[in-house]
Amino acid sequence: MGLPEMNLKADSNDRKIKILIADDDAATRLIYQKILVKWGYSVVSVSNGTEAWDALQQQDAPKVVLLDWEMPGLDGLEVCRRVRQLRSSTPIYVIMLTGRNTPEDTVEGFNAGADDYIAKPFDTQELQARIRVAERMVTIQLDLAEKIEDLEHALAHVQMLQGIIPICMHCHKIRKDDEAWDRLEDYIERYSDARFSHGICPECRKAHYPNIDFDSED
């Protein structure tokens, strides 16, 4: 394949992205795997499209795929089409890496849902650059998904009191929708995350406990 010599050491700040290699040629898979491991990536390797599709449906599925076109079982285009039908907050980044190199092939690969298309034989430095683009995209998607999950979690625990709340002018109980009356504290605790602690304000101290000196240390 004529792979040039180069520095394959990954940067120390690389995120450990898992990459799936799907190619029916064992020697090609081994070459890809050695390169990717030296770059610091975690690698899963399969020999046909059916195995690739199975791997991509797992809970911890790789987020980047180097996908050959012509494979036993499902071909690369069909795998790509199925990947695009998966519902996920972090879509899989698909790089078609194939010997089919006509402009028509490239267009067909992108139309099937590929994010990138590399024809064999490829330049190793170009492959690394394109994988880093994939890594950046996946990292952005993962970070965004985490922020959305945090926001949804926060919203699930926040209930806003809104509208007009009927409250008794004497005892300050609140009337609920079922016409029952709740203490103010119970109502707010039920419909928000607020919790109450009780004390005595200066006015009530004077009104209800006129003979007690609360400021005295004795």
Image (cartoon, rainbow, N blue to C red):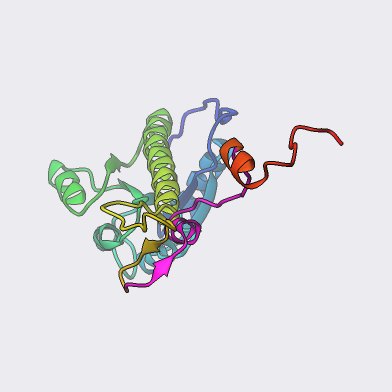
Residue 9 percent location from the top left of the image: 58, 29
Of 88 and 16, which appears nearest the observer? 88
Q: Is residue 177 magenta?
A: no
Q: Quadrant of the N terminus?
A: top left
Q: Is residue 145 left or right of residue 98?
A: right
Of 100 and 17, which appears nearest the observer? 17
Residue furthest front as drawn? 211
Question: Residue 14's image quarter?
Answer: top right
Of 71 and 83, which appears nearest the observer? 83
Q: What residue is at 60 percent from the left and 28 percent from the top?
A: 12
Residue 25 percent location from the top left of the image: 43, 57
Q: What residue is at 55 percent from the left and 25 percent from the top?
A: 7
Q: Is residue 130 above or below residue 52?
A: above
Q: Is residue 174 left or right of residue 119?
A: right
- How many marks the image carries: the answer is 0
Of 102 and 216, which appears nearest the observer? 216
Question: Residue 130's image quarter?
Answer: top left
Q: Is residue 57 left or right of residue 16?
A: left
Q: What residue is at 49 percent from the left and 61 percent from the top?
A: 186
Residue 156 percent location from the top left of the image: 41, 56
Residue 89 percent location from the top left of the image: 35, 53
Q: Is residue 57 left or right of residue 194?
A: left
Q: What residue is at 53 percent from the left and 37 percent from the top?
A: 15
For the record, the magenta segment spans 179-201
Residue furthest right as drawn? 218
Q: Quadrant of the C terminus?
A: top right
